[in-house]
Image: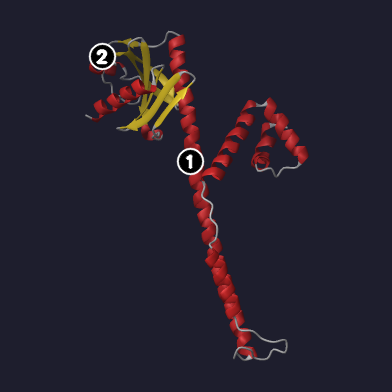
Amino acid sequence: MTCEEFRPLLEVYVDGELDAAHTLQIEKHAEACPTCGERIRVLQQRRDALAHFLPRYTAPAVVESRIREQRLAMPRANAAGESVDGFPAKALKVRQKEGGKRRMLRWVNFSLAAAAAVLVAFGGGARWGAARQRSEHLVREARETHLRALSTSHLMDVVSTDQHTVKPWFAGKLDFSPPVVDLAASGFPLTGGRVDRIDARPAAALVYQRRQHVINLLIWPTREGAIGQIEKSIEGYQVECWSRGGYNFAAISDLGAKELGEFSSEISKEIAK
């Protein structure tokens, strides 16, 4: 099975509606193809999230009671077509026909409303799943960027504790001018910066220090999409992401969550000035 043959069957497979032969082909292909295996994992996570978070509604007992009352209140005709409950047989047939049309119209309206509600809920769930997937990706990408900078000795292209030296250095290297602040007074001195990448675009990377700990602060514009507040520990590193003043920020360090939170708060305060 090729990737092109795999894709049309993916959702049917995840829903458990694929026959045994194709199911076996899908599973064998996913084992050999990491990309398609990841597609299955993401779709299963989204499906599980929708099942868990979307509300479920049970019709109240009063609905059943009202339906029964309406059925009992309908005029009846005997087998000979004679009038029953005070209605002539011909008038009864007309009333039943009109009542049937009205019930059908109500049912169509209800069905359309229910379908619209499902689409809205599914759309919201899909957006939530996409946002969650992006957040998880950003956290891992931020950590990898931090480790790569440390391991390749490419932590800084401009070395300076002066924000008025670091900020102009980015001119002509990025399509935006990143906010650069020095937090030496708060115990997080600026030490330099470099150009890096995150979220599939170039970003400014500012480097700060806290005792012997390095903090990488990645900055890029929100025009491709603002990110939500993220605070997460991943494999010994703390990552915080947020948006402010038209920019996305991702701070990464092996500091504890409390100290990195203080750093993020100080950055936001300075940018808001």
**On the rendered image, what quadrant is the C terminus found in?**
top left
Q: Earlier in the sequence, mark 1 or mark 2?
A: 1
Can residue 105 be seen?
Answer: no
Front residue of 35 and 76: 76
Closer to the eye: label 1 or 2? 1
Counting from the top left corner in percent of width and height, residue 143 is at 46, 20
| SS class, disc 1 | helix
Counting from the top left corner in percent of width and height, residue 259 is at 34, 20
* Relative to 115, 219 lies left or right: left
Query: Which residue corresponds to mark 1?
Result: 128
The answer for how far apart the CA atoms under marks 1 and 2 are is 41 Å
**On the rendered image, what quadrant is the N terminus found in?**
top right
Circle 2 packing at 10 Å, graded few (<14), some (14-19), many (20+), is some
Which of the 4 quarters of the picture holds residue 150? top left
Front residue of 167 and 130: 130
Q: Is residue 182 above or below residue 94?
A: above
Counting from the top left corner in percent of width and height, residue 69 is at 57, 75
Q: Is residue 52 above or below residue 29?
A: below
Kind of residue indicated by mark 2: Thr
Front residue of 155 and 52: 52
Residue found 64% across the figure and 30% down from its top: 37
Residue found 74% across the figure and 34% down from its top: 25
Query: Which residue corresponds to mark 2?
Result: 165
Kind of residue indicated by mark 1: Trp
Q: How many marks?
A: 2
Q: Are marks 1 and 2 in contact (CB under 8 Å)?
A: no
Counting from the top left corner in percent of width and height, residue 257 is at 38, 23
User: Which residue, as the protein is rendered here, is positioned at the far right?
Assistant: 21
Can residue 235 be seen?
Answer: yes
Which of the 4 quarters of the picture holds residue 82? bottom right
